[in-house]
Amino acid sequence: MKELALHILDLAENSLRAGATELDITIERDEASDRLTLHIQDNGCGMPPEVLARVSDPFYTTKTTRRTGLGIPLTAHAAQQAGGSFSIESQQGRGTSITAVFQHSHIDRQPLGDMAGTVAAILLANPSIELRVVCRSGSGEYSLDTRQLRGQLDGIPLNHVAVLAVLRDTIGKNMTELCLS
Ligand SMILES: Nc1ncnc2c1ncn2[C@@H]1O[C@H](COP(=O)(O)OP(=O)(O)OP(=O)(O)O)[C@@H](O)[C@H]1O
Ligand SMILES: [Mg+2]
């Protein structure tokens, strides 16, 4: 994967497969420490310690369609290649929390990429998820919360094509304004 937004999409898919009904994604750039931090938290089924100990192994998966589970190892690798770190915490029955830190200016840091596309893809397939996305940098903060959006949409589903088009546009513009790339 060449974009951090695609890593985020993979991690969000893991959360949804784990039965999450709430998903929080935070993207934070801290200029002073030259760090870009991604945080993904869900309220899915979580993992027992023996699974948690193995998730960074590319040959560990609970999928039955193939034998590799690459999402987590690839994200961990991308963070480590960019002078950063990766950590994952999980509690069975409660949920999972993942933090990936990147040195923002590192030559090997992947670009953030199409975060608007990632959010649209999550909502297209899971219109009833409660998704919160918070993006923060020295230039300001942008947040999206489906709980609020639902109230404003008056029954129009979040995966309606017109809603997704507006969301894509808004997220894209905000990412540019926040210099998150
Ligand atoms: N948020 C999560 N909640 C519960 N279990 C998870 C979560 N994320 C990952 N897992 C467990 O860890 C395994 C490995 O995840 P990983 O993303 O590395 O691979 P995968 O999803 O199995 O396959 P791929 O990402 O290559 O399609 C998953 O199969 C799942 O059992
Ligand atoms: Mg995965």
Image (spheres, rainbow, N blue to C red):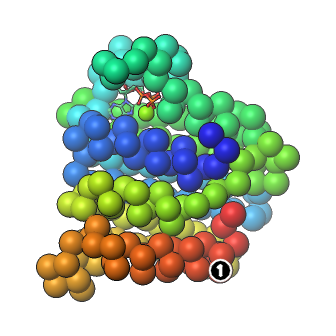
Q: Element under label 1?
A: helix
Q: Quadrant of the N terminus?
A: top right
Q: Position of residue 160 (x, y in %)?
A: 28, 72
Q: Residue lying furthest front in this view? A: 161
At label 1, the amino acid type is Glu
What is the tally of numbered marks visible in this picture?
1
**Residue sitting at x 75%, y 46%:** 109
| Residue 89 vertical placement versus 48 (above, below) | below
Q: Within the image, what quadrant is residue 138 found in?
A: bottom right
In-image side of 86 versus 110 (left or right): left
**Residue sitting at x 67%, y 39%:** 79
Q: Position of residue 88 (x, y in %)?
A: 47, 34
| Residue 75 vertical placement versus 170 (above, below) | above
Q: Quadrant of the C terminus?
A: bottom right
Q: Within the image, what quadrant is residue 149 found in?
A: bottom left
**Residue sitting at x 66%, y 75%:** 176
**Residue sitting at x 33%, y 73%:** 161
Q: Within the image, what quadrant is residue 53 found in?
A: top left
Q: Work out whether residue 94 can be spotted.
A: no
In-image side of 99 versus 40 (left or right): right
Question: Are there few (<14), some (14-19), or many (20+) residues within 10 Å of tag 1?
Answer: some
Q: Residue lying furthest right in this view? A: 107
Q: Residue lying furthest left in this view? A: 155
| Image quadrant, ligand 2 | top left
User: Which residue is identified by label 1?
Assistant: 177
In-image side of 54 versus 160 (left or right): right
Q: Position of residue 166 (x, y in %)?
A: 42, 80
| Residue 120 vertical placement versus 75 (above, below) | below
Q: Position of residue 82 (x, y in %)?
A: 75, 41
Q: Nearer the viewer, residue 21 or 62?
A: 62
Determine whether the beta carbon of the residue marked 1 sits less than 8 angstroms from the nearest atom of ligand 1. Answer: no
Q: Work out whether residue 71 can be spotted.
A: yes
